[in-house]
Amino acid sequence: MKYKRILLKLSGEALMGEKNYGIDPNRLDQYAQEIKKIKELGVEVAIVIGGGNIFRGVQAENTGIDRVQGDYMGMLATLINAMALQSALEQNGMFTRLMSGIKVESVCEPFIRRRAIRHLEKGRIVIFGAGIGNPYFTTDSTASLRAIEVEADVVLKGTRVDGVYTADPEKDKTATKYDNLSFQEAYEKNLNIMDMTAFTLCQENNLPIVVFDMNKPGNLKKLIEGEIIGTLITTN
């Protein structure tokens, strides 16, 4: 296997599937089955999931809600998605632990780094909900930080696009895909891969990022087995 311990970053919007809002149970089950395939290979899996299908903190100010309050609402949205994903994974026979950046003792554990690593070592899938517990930080930043904390080999950013392109491929048909990029190239080309905080964390800690299409069956397993899927961003 190319990677032993991974941090899988999923977007909340992806959970909508064919719906306009909320959680599509079919998409949830699809993701659970894809994750099960790599778990059966012995990969240690940590997951961070967004909350954009329910609420996005950065949009709060447009509704008159204070930005900080909106960010906390967004954290709770990620927790709802994390609980849904936890349930789907367990229904598919996997052992999980949900850890939260804010205290919600009734439904999950607080994030403790050593405990998270121990869960991974014991073969449990660890889902990190509620961001890092502070406003003004995105779930991309959470994914980068948690990946560094649990000593993951890579951040796998699952999207609906099969990699990083020169332009938005959904809007520009002439856009071409990158197979490999350095952090410096991505910065100079102003490619919107992650927010700058998340991106800088990965760069400074020499943590590679792979952007790939999570919705295509088998992609995640192929990545783990070493196939060139999506776009790899590294220090060199």
Image: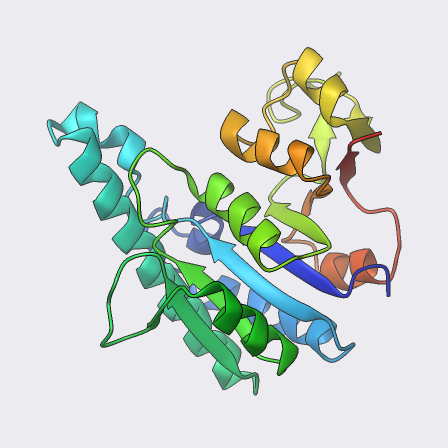
Residue shown at the point (53%, 46%) measured from the top left: 145
Depth check, front residue: 100 or 113: 113
Q: In this view, does 177 lie above or below 130?
A: above
Q: 84 or 131: which is nearer to us? A: 131
Residue displayed at 63% across by 53% down:
215
Residue 101 appears in which quarter of the rendering? Answer: bottom left
User: Looking at this rendering, what residue extends furthest in the front direction?
Assistant: 114
The residue depicted at 73 percent of the width and 42 percent of the height is 208
Question: At 84% across and 32% down in the image, what residue appears?
Answer: 180
**Residue 220 spot, x, y in % from top left:** 73, 59
Residue 161, percent from left and from top: 65, 38
Picture layout, residue 154 above or below residue 109: above
Please tell me in which quadrant of the rendered image residue 120 appears.
Answer: bottom right
Q: Is residue 166 left or right of residue 147?
A: right
Quadrant for the C terminus, please: top right
The residue closer to the viewer here, 28 or 157, is: 157
Q: Give the quadrant of the N terminus.
A: bottom right
Residue 17 screen position, x and y as percent = 47, 54
Task: Give the mark count.
Answer: 0
Q: Can residue 94 be seen in this view?
A: yes
Question: For this rendering, which residue is in front, 15 or 72?
Answer: 72
- The answer to whether residue 189 of the structure is visible from this angle is no
Q: Determine whether 74 is above or below 17 in the image.
A: above
